[in-house]
Amino acid sequence: MQRTILKNISIVNEGQILIADILLDNGYIQKIGDIENENSAKVIDGTGLHVLPGIIDGQVHFRDPGLTHKADLYTESKAAVAGGVTSFIDMPNTLPNVLTIDALNEKYEIAGQKSLANYGFFLGVNNDNLDEVIKLDTTNLLGVSDDGLYFTKKGNLLADNPETMEKLFANCKSVIAIHSEKEQIVEANEALYRNKYGENVPVSCHPLIRSEKACYEATKRAIELANKHKARLHILHLTTEAETHLFRNDIPLSQKKITTEVSVHHLWFSDKDYENLGVLIKWNPAIKTEKDKKGLLQALIDDRIDLVTTDHAPHTLEEKQKPYFESMSGAPMVQHSLNIMLEFYKQGLISLEKIAEKMCHNPAILYSIEKRGFIKEGYFADLVIVDLNQSWTVHKDNILYKCGWSPIEGTNFQTKVTHTFVNGNLVYENGNFNESHRGMALTTFKP
Ligand SMILES: NC(=O)N[C@@H](CC(=O)O)C(=O)O
């Protein structure tokens, strides 16, 4: 592996920005400080550039196996790396649904063959696989830490039986990660709008169907259960300002039993955008109001929200461009999440240090990901270099997703990812890839 020296670079890490050199060797950050140039090492002049720990995206849908006409672990991990993402945790609504350890192991095997970034996988839960889930000793899971569980109505992945919920919260030792929308409320709203519009419900009704109440009630109930059983709960992709008040910011993340995240699209879009973008921004949970969007950013900054994720959920344009009820929910984001957050930085809305905390440090803490998420000697050399003064436009020609489109096509960014290192390998450099690099499974040191 090529020894690399990053010279004179601004290091964004743990609440500070310091200019120094970094030596990468044998996959790790060997030294931070004043480093002499060596003939045998590749030297990157970091003058005027910033380096952050590689982004850890805590929620993606890379569709592999079973839905690979939309995306796969090779294409989407490549897009991820181009956006500065060096590790990801993938959701269980692949085919077969990940409801058994065998299905989980199959995904690790596929990722080992295909993924350019480091990978972890969630196990799903439904009303029938609970005994298997509870039996899990996470330390047995081939060294993985991404032991969250996942609820929602997706194929076979709904756990809505109250007894199942009680038993799960009482017995599960892992992080219980929940897609939090109350299906009964969503179904009642759907009926209401079908009555009004028949099959021609406009997509602008999506946030009224997948309503604030549906989200709030589900989140409140999950928190009650977690408190009752002292379980470790994580609410995925929060979308309403109202829910942000259910979370605390008076204790450090490492002591929190209840955590949450926001996905970049809920910070970027609001219901005003349905008019121009229509079903392309149909997501579950829905993009909501301008007030929600602002409230989410505020809660991210004041630490009621712990992480930024993408919920990268690619579908083909054909699957999207359909009438409201038939159009699939979700859109691809993983290549552009850091750029979006850096755009907020450019607008003076968030600091670089806070971005590193929410996209790098906190996912590592929350999911007990060992030796990643920080720029420290002895840690894996997962790093992203950004130029904060280079503009570019999202265009069909530079979108790397297998589905070939993005809801932010045409957006002009003022910042650019120039280099991404995964485990010390320079996997992405100014539009070029080391395509033969393969990432590693994420390890854990959970008790
Ligand atoms: N977030 C989405 O809108 N879509 C997700 C599924 C989901 O989380 O609902 C997908 O897998 O497409």
Image (cartoon, rainbow, N blue to C red):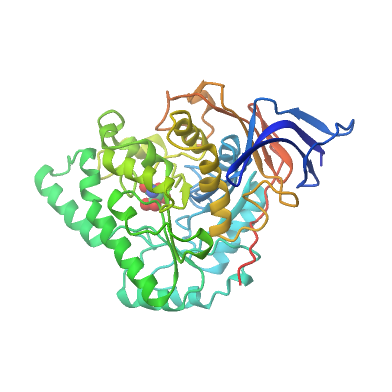
Q: Position of residue 348 (x, y in %)?
A: 44, 31
Tell which of 104 and 382 is nearer to you.
Answer: 382
Q: Residue furthest left?
A: 196
Please give the name of the residue rendered at 56% of the width and 22% of the height, measured from the top-left corner. Answer: 389
Q: Total of numbered circles in the picture?
A: 0
Q: Position of residue 87 (x, y in %)?
A: 60, 48
Q: Position of residue 35 (x, y in %)?
A: 82, 36
Residue 347 visible in the snapshot? yes
Residue 282 visible in the snapshot? no
Say if 405 sits above or below 393 in the image.
below
Tell which of 178 and 414 is nearer to you.
Answer: 414
Tell which of 59 and 42 is nearer to you.
Answer: 42
9 left or right of 390 in image: right
109 left or right of 149 in image: right
Say if 370 sits above or below 76 in the image.
below
Q: Residue furthest right?
A: 39
Q: Quadrant of the C terminus?
A: bottom right
191 left or right of 59 in image: left
